[in-house]
Image (cartoon, grey):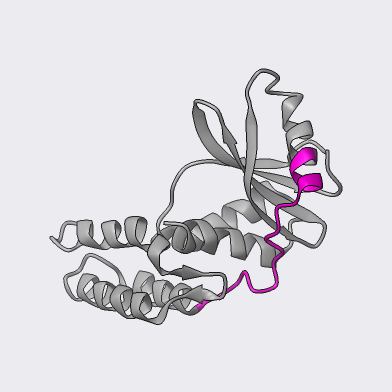
């Protein structure tokens, strides 16, 4: 991708969505802004038609509607207990949670380390099934969803889809 609009596309997606989120999806003004950026990127050849169509589908999605986002003290204690077995001297804090179908994805801040998402199947404290750390853009939402389904066997499709949307659109 060599066009001049591509850095603007990435900057808009990675940096601005945090101002645009609600738990019901993205705000309409941000959807319009991103749609315009995607149209420019498509026109300038910085985005394929497939990427453009997929990005628009994700913009209109709100896959987290049926996901429990409550971080309660009992759950946080279970996550910290499960992770403390492996990270004895590092203070941990559970800052986010996505739960559905007996699975929990917890965002954990680790003192002096990059925060990560830990995937748990069944009651806590259990060992995490998978871990995610790092960034992704809207152009990678489908890929993130596929990786979660591949690396966390048995995770409900709805939770994998919510997680992918959450980290690529909702958070930034």
Q: The N terminus appears in which quarter of the rendering?
A: bottom left
Q: Where are the magenta residues, as a range?
A: 61-77
Q: Quadrant of residue 169?
A: bottom left
Q: Return the residue found at the far top.
A: 89
Using the image, determine if residue 19 lies above or below residue 77: below
In the displayed structure image, the side of residue 158 where residue 11 appears, left or right:
left
Main SS, magenta region, reads loop
| Position in image of residue 77 (x %, y %) | 78, 39
Q: Nearer the viewer, residue 29 or 105?
A: 29
Determine whether, in the image, residue 119 is placed left or right of residue 146. Answer: right
- Residue shown at 70%/58% (left/top)? 70
Observer-nearest of 168 and 156:
168
Give the vertical position of 153 relative to 81 (above or below): below
Q: Quadrant of residue 159?
A: bottom right
Q: Residue furthest front?
A: 73
Let me know if residue 41 is in the magenta part.
no
């Amino acid at each position: 991708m060599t066009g001049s609009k591509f850095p603007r596309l990435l900057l808009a997606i990675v940096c601005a969505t945090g101002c645009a989120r609600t738990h019901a999806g993205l705000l309409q003004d941000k959807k319009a802004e991103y749609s315009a950026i995607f149209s420019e990127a498509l026109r300038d050849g910085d985005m394929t038609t497939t990427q453009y169509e997929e990005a628009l589908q994700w913009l209109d999605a709100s896959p987290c509607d049926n996901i429990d986002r409550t971080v309660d003290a009992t759950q946080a204690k279970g996550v910290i207990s499960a992770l403390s077995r492996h990270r004895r001297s590092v203070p941990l804090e559970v800052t986010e949670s996505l739960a559905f179908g007996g699975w929990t994805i917890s965002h954990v801040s680790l003192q002096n380390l990059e925060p990560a998402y830990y995937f748990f199947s069944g009651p806590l404290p259990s060992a995490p099934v998978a871990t995610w750390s790092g960034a992704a853009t809207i152009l990678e939402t489908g890929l993130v969803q596929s990786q979660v389904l591949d690396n966390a066997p048995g995770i409900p499709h709805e939770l994998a889809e919510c997680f992918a949307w959450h980290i690529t659109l909702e958070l930034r």
